Structures are given as structure tokens and as C-alpha cells.
Amino acid sequence: MRFSGKDIQQKSVALCLPLARASRLSPPLFLVASLLLLFVLSACSSNEKDTYVARDVETLYNLGYMSLEKKRWKMAAGAFDEVERQHPYSVWARQSQLMGAYALYMDDEYDSAILAAERFLSLHPGNSHAAYAHYLIGISYYEQISDVYRDQRITEQAAQALTEVVRRYPESEYARDATLKLDLVYDQLAAKDMDVGRFYLNQEQYLAAMGRFQHVLDAYGTTSHVPEALHRMVECFTALGVTSEAQKYAAVLGHNAPNSQWYKRSYAMVTGEDPNVPTENRSFFARIFGN
């Protein structure tokens, strides 16, 4: 399963915020504004004899922008790279670094986009647009997340990068979107732990299984996998004959998810009773602990 933010039609570049909510990431709005200024400068200086370098910069930058407009991502990335290579001291070189990273992202060249954004941050760590670069790194990892049956290293890197966005820029639009994506990332990581834990449980390697299930409870306590993790802990402790611990986890499950299938299974496992059969009017906790 891939978590993609690329499915809804992209809005006009000039009007978009630089976010990848349900649409593809838009280029930085400040860079689009810079392009408008560049067009004006080009028109004003086209008749001067000593503007060869400026005209060359304009040609390359405008080629990159027009390529973006036509969704020719590779051509755009190449043009922006040439701006920096041929004119590293130009005012447009720094903008080209981020625009090039954006073009690489749009071309699904996520590793290259990450490297380009990281290079921008290494050269301009205090830049006012560093938030965009950090966010671009995060969603480039995010777009590469695969199903839970594969290695989740990329998912962990996405979590780290998106967490960094939230930590550094808590009041930004990027942080709000990163927070939403982190919920899905944590759910994915929890799902992986659950999958491995079930494998150990089926192999009767209870301690190894419990380590995975407990990690879900400790690290991903807000995900949808918590009820099952609690039940699996009940199952493991019951198999090990540690009834008191099984009862404790069952009680927590009964408090947090009383209507879930996992609660019913834990109830039956701990009490030996069918949870669907009416019993005397006593709470689950009272029945478990004999109060």
C-alpha cells in the first residue's frame, strides 16, 4: 500500500499553497512570485547590450518554469540545475535549487529530490524558506511508503522527517499537514509491529511477540491497532500461565474498547464465559478481579 497525496487535480500554480494535502505538492509560492519579477526584468533589459549573462539566466529559469507548467518535470529539473551550475552567484541560483527539488519530486525521483532539498538546507540553513525544504524531504519519504509486509525503513525516515517539520515549524501550514500524515505513518509502523508480533505468536515465541505488541502500546498508542495489541498481550500472558497480567490487560481493553471483537475474545479467554450470554449485573472489572 502506498500513501499517495497525488490523486486530486492540481490547482493553478500561482494560487496554490506549497502543500501536498490531497493534491501534488505545489512549487513554493515565493518562487512563483520571483518568476513574475524575472519576466519583468527580462522585458526591461532585452534591448541592452551588456545583459548577456542576465538574459542567459532568464532563459534557463524561464525554461524551467515553462517546463513545470507543461509538466515536463525532467526538463524543468535540468533547466533549474543549469541555472545554478552556470550562474552560481546569481540571485536566481538559490531559488533554482528548491524549484529543481520540487521538479524532481513531481517526477517521482524522490531520492534525488531529498538530496536536492538537503543540499539546499546545508548551503542555506537559516534561509526563510527552509521550512519548505524540510517539508519536501518529509513528503518525498512519505510517497515511498510501501505495504506492511516489506521493510519499513522508509516509513521510519518519513516519521523522522515529518516530526522534524512539526518540531521546527509548529505554527506553519507545513506542520499541520505533516501532523496529519504522521497519523498514517504511525499506523503503518504499528501495523508492521503487529504483523511481526503475530508471526512470533504463531511460532509460540511469546516473549518476542509481547515485545512487539507492547511497543505498539507504548509508541503508537493512538493508532487503530491498540485494541488488538491489548488482546494479543492477554493471549500471550494466558499462554504463559500468568493469569494476573492477562487480567490486567483485559481490563484495560474492556475500558478502552468495550464493544470491539478483541474485548469479546479477551473476555472469553480470561473468564471462560461467552461474552454474548447475559450474566448478572456486574461490571467486567468486578468479574475479573472478584470484587
Image (tube, rainbow, N blue to C red):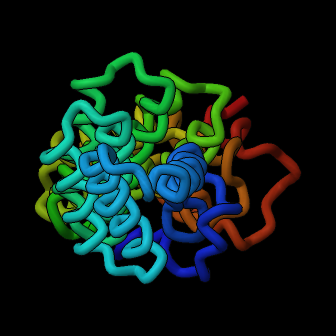
Q: Position of 139 compared to 87: left or right?
A: right
Q: Position of residue 44 (x, y in %)?
A: 54, 52
Residue 217 falls in image quadrant: top left
Which residue is at 33% across, 80% downward?
72
Quarter of the rendering containing residue 71:
bottom left
**Quarter containing the C terminus:** top right
Residue 57 vertical placement versus 68 (above, below):
above
Looking at the rendered structure, the number of numbered marks drawn on it comes to 0
Camera-nearest residue between 149 and 86: 86
Where does residue 47 sit, x and y in percent of width and height?
44, 57
Q: Is residue 20 above or below residue 107?
A: above
**Residue at 49% over, 22% down:** 168
Q: Residue at x 73, y 36 (%)?
A: 286
Q: Is residue 241 above or below residue 11?
A: above
Give the residue drawn at x 71%, y 72%. Answer: 276
Q: Horizontally, is 153 left or right of 286 in the view? A: left
Residue 180, visible in the rendered structure: no
Rendered-image quadrant of the N terminus: bottom left
